[in-house]
Amino acid sequence: EIPSDLLESGVPLDREANSSKSQGRNLAVEQWENCYENDNVPHKLVIGVGIGSMYAKNYGNKRKKILKSIETILAKTNMVFSRQLNLFIEVGNIIILNEESNDNWNNPASTEGSKKCSKSIFQQFRDWKNTGLMNGATRMGTWHLLDDCHDPASAVGIAYNTQGS
């Protein structure tokens, strides 16, 4: 459960911008009822995102391309969440690593040209959590780690609610 002080209620949502019709498709996404208290009022959840070096490498380590990929993910997520749950998600903080980063939670490829890393995404996330970066001055409702050096069948992203620690 996300603490209420991390959710802004009464946030005006641009339903047309998040509408499936604006994407050229007409998908019926109905609002769920009685999911949480005051779910009839629009809410906003502000999240933090950590980008691992292999995810960044997929976008040429270009900040603009990385941010565009996050924007695309959130646009698709908000298309459903804003209509179904009356919840709009926005990014409040982004941390981007590159292959040369010495951060303990960096997880570059174990050999040149490989997408295999020495850590699982779960260990990488624990290492990131242990840095304390998630509990710094910028408090987020959740933190999400995106990286891409794991088996195709495994996770590319993982999330953590900082209030649970």
Image (cartoon, rainbow, N blue to C red):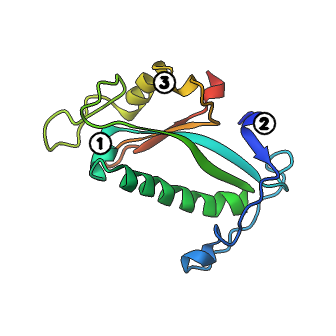
Q: Does dot 1 land on a helix, a strand or a loop?
A: helix
Which residue: 71% across, 53% down? 87
Q: Residue at x 27, y 47 (%)?
A: 57
Three-letter code for the amino acid on which mark 1 is drawn? Met
Q: Specify the quadrant of the image occupied by residue 2.
A: top right
**Badge 3: residue crowd in 10 Å (few <14, some 14–19, many ≥20):** some
Residue 99 image position (x, y, % from top left): 25, 36
Q: In this view, does 139 lie above or below 27?
A: above
Residue that carries the numbered disc 1 in the rendered image: 54
Outermost residue on the left side: it is: 112
Q: Label for residue 129?
A: 3
Who is closer to the viewer here, 157 or 6? 6
User: Identity of the amino acid at label 2?
Assistant: Ser
Marks 3 and 2, the one that precedes in the sequence: 2
Q: Mark 2 points at which residue?
A: 4
Determine crowd level at label 2: few under 14, some 14-19, many 20+ residues with C-alpha closer than 10 A.
few
Q: Distance between the residues labelled 2 and 1?
A: 34 Å
Q: Distance between the residues labelled 3 and 2?
A: 22 Å
